[in-house]
Amino acid sequence: MNIAILGTGNVGQTIGSKLIAVGHSVRIGSRTATNEKAAAWVKSAGERASAGTFADAAAFGEILFNCIGGMVTLDALRMAGAANLSGKILIDVSNPLDFSKGFPPTLSVCNTDSIGEQIQREFPDALVVKTLNTTNCKIMVEPTLLTGDHDLFMSGNDAGAKATVREMLESWGWKTIIDLGDITTARGTEQLLPIWVRLMGALGTANFNFHIVKA
């Protein structure tokens, strides 16, 4: 399958490398076709890797991963082009982290909205699935790095899109993926980030995850 990664940071590169490893062709997208980080990743990732602009990547991908910072996500997706997103699954990994006042970050949107909802409103023909945004990118692609049970969350309006994403993530080793409901439930997972950041400080590592236990 041809898959697009929007964003050249650690999250995008880590997910892109995982997709290459399991047999997909991946095009990583950025604002320019000459992005140095993208070029370096392509060189290291092999013949099934390529790079281009956001629009190039979005046109290439049958499924897209949004790995761009939440505060600039909509601008990047506008550059990718609504026509290139139409009818495609868009897996939103972003979080609305605002570092303008330093660390720890605040949330640029919360309570009554979410980045996931903003994407779905602006691009109504895209099949937005919010997931993977509550854990470190190393754990995203290799959940067995953690011992014991731990969970992912998923939000989205389209049941078929969520089923496709679930199948992909289960093939990576995820055992428990909790479907929270429609895209409005992305508010909950995005609002986990303040506690996630503080847990990282308390634990001294980013390699941890949440596990939900019920009676």
Image (tube, grey):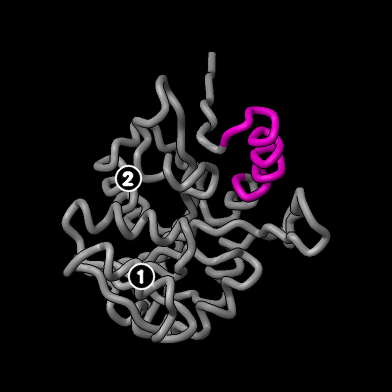
Q: Quadrant of residue 127?
A: bottom left
The image quadrant of residue 116 is: bottom right
Task: Compare residues 104 and 131 and report the one nearer the observer.
Answer: 104
What residue do we see at 58% from left, 80% from top?
75
Amino acid type at mark 2: Leu
Identify the residue position indicated by label 2 in the image.
169
In the picture, the disc for residue 197 is none
Quadrant placement of the N terminus: bottom left
Instruction: Work out whether residue 122 or residue 190 is closer to the camera in this orientation and state it.
Output: 190
Residue drawn at (47%, 50%), measured in percent from left and top? 131
Q: Quadrant of residue 97?
A: bottom right
Q: Is residue 157 magenta?
A: no
Q: Where residue 15 sits: x, y (%)?
A: 36, 55
Q: Is residue 115 above or below residue 27?
A: above
Residue extending furthest toward the top:
215
Marks 2/1: CA–CA distance: 26 Å
Which range is magenta? Answer: 189-205
Residue 209 vs 39, above or below: the answer is above
Predominant secondary structure, magenta span? helix
Is 82 left or right of 4, judged from the image as shown? right
Residue at the location (32% across, 45% down)?
Answer: 169
Q: Which residue is mark 1?
A: 40
Quarter of the image for the C terminus: give it. Answer: top right
